[in-house]
Image (spheres, rainbow, N blue to C red):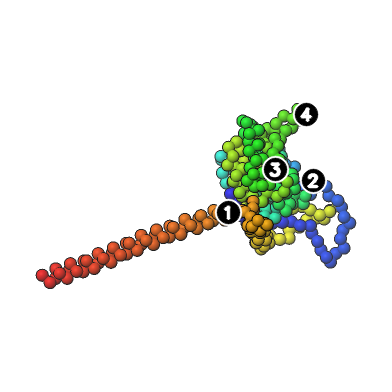
Amino acid sequence: MAISSPPLFLFPESSPMEAPPPPTILTQDELKKIAAYKAVEFVESGMVLGLGTGSTAKHAVDRIAELLHQGKLTNIVGVPTSKKTQEQAISLGIPLSDLDKHPILDLAIDGADEVDPYLNLVKGRGGSLLREKMVESACKKFIVIVDQTKLVKNLGGTGDAVPVEVVPFCWKFTETRLQRLFEEKFEVGCVAKLRVCGKNEEPFVTDNMNYIVDLFFEKEIGDLEAASDEILRLAGVVEHGMFLNMATTVIVAGGAGRSINMVDANMSALRERIENIRTKERLQRCYRVEQAGWCYSSGYDYTLKRDAKLSESLNFMVLVCKTFGLTIATSSSLLCILSVVVYLRFLGQ
Ligand SMILES: O=C(CO)[C@H](O)[C@H](O)COP(=O)(O)O
């Protein structure tokens, strides 16, 4: 799991005192490049780096190679998150390794398909989610680089794909179970579709020789942790593209032709406020009063039940310890008294 540090957002630079420069419209790719170059500023010589996959991460890999060739970075080792990135890094002369040799990485830089206000991500529309998740969960820091189009209020709420990597064996069975899981357990309309490619619509095959089932939701998923647990519990599923609590920093490039700047490094207060609002909303959903009375809705928070069970177990342990302690104390006292009595009797003789 990535070690958390304050998330970081980059916003368009603004200076109220100066007249704004004439607007230049940057393309989405130019914005991706700006975010990528900013992220590479966090790379230091001697680091082991997770190298992401996709059009945004590609700019970061290019930049790392450029700085290596200029001698501004030295002694860098990269761990690629896909065969494509591996080929790119090799062609640029970046020394590579893998998780077997480097189980702990200093930093990973990668793009994302969606980023929510908690810095949870959807990844894998490029098909590399498994290796990405393996590498990025082994990093001390994980910087996500996106243009502003990737920001969403809720994961899955845009109607775009949330990918799940599945084994090819009876993929249709797994596809059906995934769709049913969300329709029946989470009561979220969902269409599960095997990803295909090419003229003949052959199944898309991942670097790990698996298939991808894309989930299209009608509305936001809701409890992401519960959804993640339930997906992973299905035999046939290898991994899913929700990256929860993994990103430590998100760099967002946006604005029409404005340079970008670092504004805020600590979003913890904002996150706390968002958390409070979410809790309130969850409670309202859970205990919604319908005409017929109290209604147990799909907004149920699984973590509440888990926490309650944990505290119940803790209470039980405390009780056992107390009883044990009391027994020892009582026995010791009785033994003392007995010893004194025997000693006094012995003296009396
Ligand atoms: O997860 C990914 C690949 O599996 C990519 O990071 C994600 O799809 C973003 O891609 P891009 O930078 O091209 O927009």
Q: Which residue is mark 4?
A: 199
Residue type highlighted by circle 3: Cys
- Measured in 3D between alpha carbons, the distance from the residue under mark 2 to the one under mark 1, in whole angstroms, is 40 Å
Q: Residue 179 in the image: x percent, y percent?
A: 66, 40
Q: Which residue is mark 1?
A: 303
Q: Residue 267 in the image: x percent, y percent?
A: 68, 60
Q: Which residue is mark 2?
A: 29
Q: Which mark is residue 190?
A: 3
For the point 73% across and 52% down, which residue is it? 152
Which quadrant is the C terminus positioned in? bottom left
- Measured in 3D between alpha carbons, the distance from the residue under mark 4 to the one under mark 2, in whole angstroms, is 27 Å
The residue lying furthest to the top in this view is 200
Q: Secondary structure at mark 3?
A: strand
Residue type highlighted by circle 1: Thr
Closer to the observer: label 1 or label 3?
Answer: 3
Q: Residue 346 in the image: x percent, y percent?
A: 14, 68
Q: Is residue 310 visible?
A: yes
For the point 56% across and 40% down, which residue is it? 101
